[in-house]
Amino acid sequence: MGCSLILISLSILSCSALILAGDFRKDIDIVWGSEKAKILENGQAITLSLDKASGSGFQSKAQFLFGKISMQLKLVPGNSAGTVTSYYLASKGTMWDEIDFEFLGNLSGDPYTVHTNVITQGKGDREQQFRLWFDPTVDFHTYSILWNPKTIIFYVDGTPIREFKNMIKTMNVSYPEKQAMRVHSSLWNGDDWATRGGLVKTDWSKAPFTACYRNYEIQDCDWSAHGSNVSCGGDDPNSWLNEGIDEKSMKRLKWVQSNFMTYNYCNDAKRFGIGLPAECHVVMN
């Protein structure tokens, strides 16, 4: 699955579309806390655990330039304060690109915070945070990231919660479009900031903490250095490569942002002394 990538200009890349269900035995490397990561169900599921000694994490073997990634997660139940379950795309280097889902734990009975960010060329500061309209610890829910040449969309159970458009040409806002990324996930201790700004610490008597993953699916491109067209299934108007926010999806997006958004960097004028970032001045249709 995924792709092998040669980092050269898009103008000389061609690709064929792939839509594959993942097998964690074949598709990922456990890169941290190997004894705390367990692959189950014939490669269809994986659990990550955290205790006071260490967390755990994995990354995809393949890297790709543009794709749509979906995974079902069941988050740490009970008193998860201080824990961070992350699920994101990232490239390498000091000028890296990254597209983040992070799930910030809380005291028993209090809701999780879904923390999102878009980092381009090593610069982030584009956080938006949300509550969920369900308990994410009771059952599995699907979290998806769409990344194509025109937009990035974060989905929860198929409902868009955030969009970050490519505005390089119109507003000179940087956008991740030249660096290949891998899928990453980890469970780690973030009690210096994750819960109520770090006021609530991890209760290690509740360890080990465990998050569960299953049904990893990726739609991406098998890139080669031959040809001059970037198709990636692009001839199909319903392809992920052409996907965006339609009228129905925009209503759902606005519903989420009106009722469940708890922080938006574009509303935090005090944070940016020289004015809000340029993309914040674009009115959502």
Image: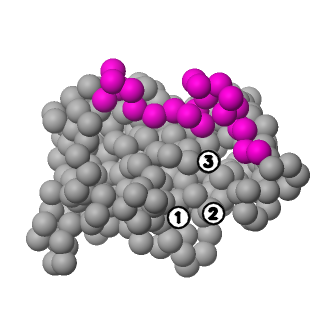
Q: Which residue is mark 2?
A: 179
Q: Earlier in the sequence, mark 3 or mark 1?
A: 3
For residue 230: magenta?
yes
Point out the image quarter for the C terminus.
Answer: top left
Question: Residue at position x 62%, y 62% from top?
Answer: 178
Q: Which residue is mark 1?
A: 97
User: Quick check: marks 3 and 2 in contact, CB under 8 Å?
Assistant: no
Of the pair 100 and 245, the residue shown nearer to us: 245
Q: Earlier in the sequence, mark 2 or mark 1?
A: 1
- Residue 104: give x, y in percent of width and height: 32, 51
Task: Give SS at disc 1.
Answer: loop
Q: Is residue 11 above or below residue 212?
A: below
- Residue 212: give x, y in percent of width and height: 51, 37
Of the pair 78 and 234, the residue shown nearer to us: 234
Local packing at callout 1 (Cα closer than 10 Å; few below 14, some 14-19, many 20+) is many
Q: Which residue is mark 3?
A: 66
Three-letter code, disc 1: Asp
Res 156 visible: no
- Residue 20: give x, y in percent of width and height: 72, 31
Main SS of the magenta segment? Answer: loop
User: Quick check: marks 2 and 1 in contact, CB under 8 Å?
Assistant: yes
